[in-house]
Amino acid sequence: MREPSHVKHHTWVRLTCLCALAVSSTLWATHARAFKIVAPANGTTLTSGQPTAAEVEAGREAGLVEVRYYWYPEQTEALVEQGEERAGKASQSGMATEKYWQKDSITGAPVVALPALTSTVDRVPPYGGQLPVPPDAIGRMRLLAIADISQGRLGRKTVFDEVFVTVQPKADLLSIDFETEKPLQLGRTGQSSAYGHVDSLGKIFELPVVGEFADGISRPLSSPSTGTIYTSGNDHILKVLPDGLLQIVGIGKTTLTVTNHGKQATLDVRVEVNPEPNEPPIADAGTAKTVKAGTKVRLSGLQSRDPEGEALFYAWGQVRGSKVAMLDVNMAEPSFTAPYVSETRTFRFKLRVTDKKGADSVPAFVDVTVEP
């Protein structure tokens, strides 16, 4: 017996609704499965020193214990957490042993960090709250949120999310200046070059620049993301590179100028380094890769090279993602174990190489995508 057409229609409608519901449920599950920073949103502009609302979604992660929020300038290396003595097993990103104690590959500063906010379920909103924006923050900043997840007798695991925001002070910039001795003398005349010293052609370095603002706070203005522009009076002596880096390319006297929001400062520089010609090495951090959580990852700087064929010194750092315990950071091929992630996350690593005469490379970067 033929089924009436209106019955077919209703059957089709029911099937369509069921399919739509299934798709909707799948999309909701996909959206809700990940730990995620909801506020502040990626790309937001915030104000120095003024708190902002922080909020996260736990997704499908059960057993959330606490969430810690950290601020970093955009290219600062990911820092080891200073919180290894919390109750319970140390979190995955808490490096308690001297084995993983590192220093920033450029500044040499100890890599430890204190959270700007530590929040639990009792806060409003849960695991969020009023997040202090550092008073001296300026430019592009990275907000990293690390969540501790209880696994009962198995201890704890961590998940993370991060967003990038721009921080601007409300106060006007009054003045800008180099934070260094004046005039600046680079090099040691008549002495041989030594690794780690600014005494060789090809050496790349940074000069700290600070701004005085109308609110009485000094803020670092070395990064171009803060609006600072560097100009060299003689590109054959000091060369301006991207990201506010400077390179010694010749011997003599020159003047460096920095400008920011209409303010300007100059610095007289005298360069007297080892005159032996030296081409800077070239860093190659390898190709991007995608791996599964728990996989041993080996980075490779083996394609890095020096035009004169000299041996290289390696310095690896991490500038994106929750801190991983990286072994052999001063070797060509460091390694780490890809951590647990609730959904696909990106970890970014930086490599700088230096030749035996002290000439540096421009930093090279490589991304490692970790899947659950």
Image (cartoon, rainbow, N blue to C red):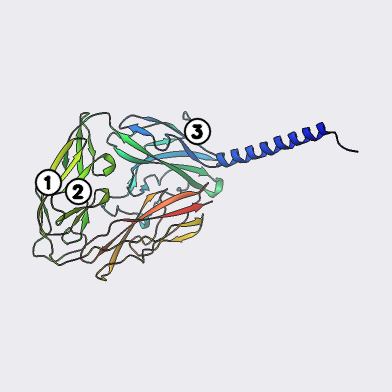
Q: Where is residue 60 in the image (x, y as percent from the top left)?
A: 57, 41
Residue of label 3: 121
Q: Which of marks 1 and 3 is in front?
A: 1
Residue at position x 46%, y 44% in the image? 160
Residue at position x 85%, y 33% in the image? 4
Residue 165 falls in which quadrant of the image? top left
* Disc 1 and disc 2 in contact, CB within 8 angstroms: yes
Q: How many discs appear?
A: 3
- Residue 357 seen in the current view: yes
Label 2's element?
loop
Position of residue 331 relative to residue 216, above or below, is below
Residue 62 falls in which quadrant of the image? top right
Residue at position x 23%, y 41% in the image? 228
Residue at position x 49%, y 53% in the image? 370
> Which of these two is toward me, 67 or 298?
298
Label 3's element?
loop
Residue of label 2: 207
Mark closer to the chain start, 3 or 2 = 3
Residue of label 1: 267
Name the amino acid, label 2: Leu
Distance (Cα) linking label 3 and label 2: 44 Å
Name the amino acid, label 3: Val
Name the amino acid, label 1: Leu
Mark closer to the chain start, 1 or 2 = 2
Q: Where is residue 172 in the image (x, y as percent from the top left)?
A: 22, 30
Q: Where is residue 298 in the image (x, y as percent from the top left)?
A: 43, 62
